[in-house]
Image (cartoon, rainbow, N blue to C red):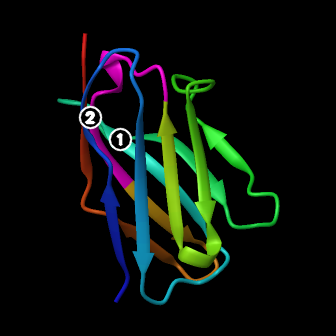
């Protein structure tokens, strides 16, 4: 049974920072991509950032967060983090952690954590 648990969401003012954490437990294939997605109010879920498990840890960011958000991971802990700086009201939404391994067909989601940025 694989479980993803997110933490670190909250209410902040525009310009402030938050750090999200996601801890994965269970049998997860070591070659995977971990990522963060968000669902703004009334909109569809969208990609925020992903990071691969290879040595270089290649990353991918949505254009809207480039230069403000940084994704990182700790393979030993099966954890992924999202440092969010210079937050904007449009960053408001429920943030979800994801683990995907195309080698095994594994794809798991966390329960989500709310991020609210006031203007």
* Residue at horizontal 19 percent and vertical 30 percent from the top: 41
Q: Residues within 10 Å of mark 2 (few under 14, many from 20)?
A: many
Q: Which residue is mark 1?
A: 38
Residue linked to disc 2: 93
- N-term-proximal mark, 2 vs 1: 1
User: Which residue is at the front of the view, 17 or 67?
Assistant: 17
Q: Is 51 situated left or right of 8 in this image?
A: right
What residue lies at 29% left-to-right and 37% top-to-bottom? 44
Instruction: Give the residues drawn in magenta, as a range.
Output: 85-96
Residue at figure coordinates x 69%, y 47% from the top left: 59
Is residue 92 inside the magenta stretch?
A: yes
The residue lying furthest to the left in this view is 42
Q: CA distance from mark 2 to mark 1?
A: 6 Å
Q: Position of residue 116 (x, y in %)?
A: 23, 29
Look at the numbered discs 2 and 1 and tell me whether their residues touch, using CB distance below 8 Å. Answer: yes
- Location of residue 34 by image quarter: bottom right
In the image, taking residue 107 as reference, residue 89 lies left or right, namely left
110 shown above or below 112: below
Is 10 left or right of 100, judged from the image as shown? left
Q: Quadrant of the N terminus?
A: bottom left
């Amino acid at each position: 049974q694989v479980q993803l648990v997110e933490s670190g969401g909250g209410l902040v003012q525009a310009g402030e920072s938050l750090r999200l954490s996601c801890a994965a437990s269970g049998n997860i294939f070591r070659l995977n991509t971990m990522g963060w997605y968000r669902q703004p109010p009334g909109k569809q879920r969208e990609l925020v950032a992903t990071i691969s498990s290879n040595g270089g840890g290649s990353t991918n960011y949505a254009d809207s967060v480039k230069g403000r958000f940084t994704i990182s991971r700790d393979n030993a802990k099966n954890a992924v983090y999202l440092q969010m700086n210079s937050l904007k009201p449009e960053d408001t939404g429920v943030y979800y952690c994801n683990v995907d391994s195309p080698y095994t067909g594994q794809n798991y989601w966390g329960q989500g954590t709310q991020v609210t940025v006031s203007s």
